[in-house]
Image (spheres, coloured by chain):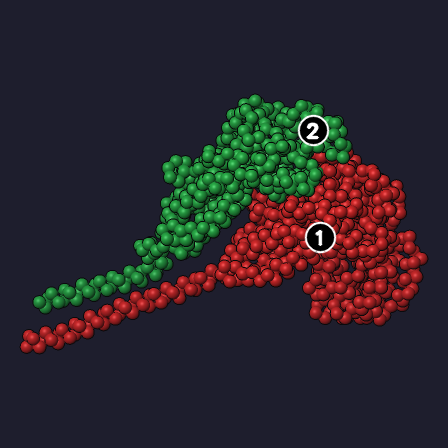
Chain colours: A green, B red
Amino acid sequence: MERTRWIFIGILVVVLLIIGVSVVARIVTGGNSPDETELVLVAPETITVRVLTALPVEPWVRDAATAYNATNPTLNGVPVKVEITPMDGLTALGRWDRNDFGALEAGKTMESLTEAEKAALKNFPTAWIPDSRYLVELANASYKERLGRDVFLTDGEYRARPIAISLFTWGIYESRATVLEQRFGGVSWNIIHDAAVAKGGWPELGGDPSWGFFKLVVPNPNKNAGGLTAMVAAAGEYYKRTDISVADFTDPQFQTWLRELMGSVTDFSSASAYTAEDFALFGYSVGDGGQLLESDLLQNMQGILTRWDDPLKIYYPQYVTWFEFPFTIWVGPETSALEKNAALEFQRFLLSEEQQKAALAYGLRPTNPNVPLDATPESLFVKWKDRGVEMVVPRSDAMRNPDREVLLALLRWFQLNVAK
Amino acid sequence: MSNQFNDKQRTTLIIGAIGIVVVCMCVILTAWAGQSVWNSLRERRGVTTSQGGWDSTTAEVTVAVSPGMASTLAKLAEQFNAQARKTPDGSPMLVRTLSVVPEKMVEQSLANPPFQAIAPDSSLWLNQLDQRWVTQYSAGEGESLIPIGNRRFGDPVRYAASPVVIAAWESVARGLGWPGRDIGWKDIQQKATADPTFKWNHPSTGHASGLLATLAEFYAGAGLTRGLTEEAATAQTTLDYVRAVEATVRFYGEGEDVIVQRLAAEGRNFLDAFVAQEQVVIAWNQTQPGERLVAIYPAEGTLWADHPLALLELGMPGETPITDNQRRTYQAFVDYLISAEVQQQLLSVGYRPVDLDVRLDRTGSPFSGDAVDRRQPQTTLQIPAANVVEVVQNVWWYTKRPTNIYLVVDTSGSMEENDKIGLTRVALRSFVDQIRGDRDQVGLITFATNVYVERPLQPLDEAGRTALYTAIERLSASGNTALIDGVWEAYSRLLVEGNAEAINAIVVMTDGQENSSRQSLSALQRRIQQEQGKQIVIFTIAFGKDADEKFMRSMAEMGGGQYRRATETDIEDLYKIISTYF
């Protein structure tokens, strides 16, 4: 009996000492051991879905987010809020690639982070809507090298889903388009090249001397995914095929042709990534025309008319490039399961018939096949049909997306030959 | 016995057990308390090290803005602040503005700037910042898959636009063929070369309008309208042409805002034409009586002052990062600037709104007359790559109109107070640093009870510069104030040493009152009138509260220059500003 008591007391002392020592040890080691919150699931006050959004769809997605937030959405009883961050797809790719958002390095877990490191992740994007699927593939390739796995899924529940589509079309100021048509009978990259190299400028082409030289509008490839697309499309027409390789871009004859074409761009220094808006704001003074995203051109058509009294005319090229704006959810541990599921809900909202109809007012083509382009009176496809916009894209060849090597070759060429 | 022992033992054991429990509880409580204190200390230390420049919750944003837009943006910031907006955590959103010349804005933005956002007059400056940033921090970029996106600033937004034009009096413009004929940079340059009475001006290349005018000269000199390269810009024939044109420029200066002030002060005959934003023409005609200005849109093409606004991505080692609240304030201010209400306000003062729904042709719009044309410009000059622009800026120093300047400096006893003499040494040195033309000459005259020619006029080659710096370093203060005699000496010397092709100028500074000269102000005035054809410009600086402002103002007026007041804190900046006139 006495021995039992001693043993009991001994155990009690040992237990208490273990607790005491473990608490002291935890403090001494800086409190980096797993947090209590990891053991007990505590529902957050709000779930915030942060969506990095490509510029062409940003106005629509932002308005959709406002409408969505106004419905006071919840997930598992927790209020959800969607926040939109506009960012050009290529710029975002650069930031993913440099890991500017602070994704955990291989082997690190959320549990091993300090409070400050956890706080730094509070603005980590939940989802990304780039301009094109190829940007997602490039981001995945970058993370695969670093982490050994994809961070954006291409199949399964969280797979990337296109939310709207648009294609690159020619937009030319009507006064200038009329002269080009009279002189060349249409608009294409080869015709634009001929106009660009005309030594006498517009007077030589039959235009007004005050127009100066022919001025092409191409987005700066360092600031806008559309700039790269334009160069790939030009290459497609030059070679008359849809698949462009690095060898094609390094061909000296092609490089001369491309340099002459890019030599007619007035200003690559423009700070803005919103090329179509610039095109509208500065009018024909900075560009007579260019190949830009159809939705951007349609969104700015009214502004161009109001400001310059000279509308744009739309032409569809033979070699077309499509942007499908995939809604892509980050699958890494930096965002919680609740955030991922909330992002999925917002993705469904964007694909709803109502929001797909709303996209028509932004000149975007719905991905939901149940929504025709003339589904609403606000559709820009209805409003601007007299300006050359086509509901059904004329027969054309779709350009294949550039791979990583082509992308790098293009950027390098631009940096060495045009930007400098 | 055994039971007794057991009871005693039991009591001891219970007390012992309780004691152990209490000790353990104390250890736990002490540990928790210690952890709280440690965390709190760590948090505080984090705030002071990572957020050294401002508090981690501040929602105050300072925007550096180019001088031409400074007053407009300051007014809009005031309106924004009056709305008393708050961030979600209750911090007040405040926007302050700081007038900074764009070239300096780029320089300061590279490291620890005293502002968080920038609003230069043109995207050209953002491009230069981009270029310099990438050059400075390109290490590691090569390893990146996508070598883009690493920028010093976030996506910029534009809030107003205005094309750069040649602003001319209507009579002058009609003489050139306006409005029936397209007029170009070449016409202005030819007119200025052929007619010595034709007075025109463009700001220095530190401003968008000055840079454009200079680029246009280089294009014309190279016989191009696009594709300007470093080789073409530095070809001897180009340099000769630009030098001939620059010889016709009356003076350079801070920017169009100062030109407008001088036009208002000195009247119609001050200049025939000058390079400025279209908005300046509108604003002048709205407020000034008499002959109106008209905008000539250069036929070869022009450039847009596109007024971008961008948030700097601060956070390099040793730099205070932008706070979340500052980002919120910046975004709220951007939204405010592009709101319909503010866009209308910007239109009313002559800017073209970026909101394309705002019509330029509505009744009452400042674009409704014929002094400006909303359908212009028809074409723009091609903006060369940033490295070519930089070459043009540097080469311009070798083509610009040469300058002969006498720095006339007060070294009387009062300059010892508050170390004014020390501050003057620094300011003079900064002034000389800014004068970079290979044909520019600078001399130094001091005055106290007597006048001393410290350095005669001499070119600023290496030897000349060193000699001037040495003379500046040797300046000391004592005696009275023979201000007029100092200016008289400089004037006499410039009459002999100066030449008609150069800008001949005196920059005189005093902190007190004239009390020791043999000459009088009226005698100086008579002399200036007698030598009117020589065009020697006098800039005057009243340093500190005791300087005779009225006297200095009169002297500047009779010398056709400018009067400025300086304090101990801005004397260096003031000398730098005045250097832009040369």
Residue A302 position, x and y percent, is 63, 40
> Tag 1: Cα neighbours inside 10 Å, few (<14), some, or many (≥20)?
some
Residue type, label 2: Thr
Cβ atoms at labels 1 and 2 below 8 Å apart: no
Residue A232 position, x and y percent, is 56, 30
Any mark on residue B104, and which? none
Q: What is the distance, in whole Å, between disc 1 and disc 2 at their CAs?
A: 35 Å
Out of A291 and A407, give the one closest to the viewer.
A291
Q: Chain of mark 2?
A: A
Out of B24 and A351, give the one closest to the viewer.
A351
Q: Is residue B395 visible?
A: no
Q: Quadrant of residue A319?
A: top right
Left of B179 or right of it: where is A350? Answer: left
Query: Residue at point 55% right, 32% down?
Result: A167
- Are tags 1 and 2 found on a single chain? no
Residue B400 position, x and y percent, is 78, 45
Residue on which the image places disc 2:
A178
Residue type, label 1: Ser
Q: Quadrant of residue A203?
A: top right
Query: Residue at point 33% right, 57% down?
Result: A36
Any mark on residue B348, and which? 1
Is disc 2 placed on a helix, strand or loop? helix
Residue A317 position, x and y percent, is 59, 27
* Residue lying furthest top: A240
Out of A166 and A232, give the one closest to the viewer.
A166
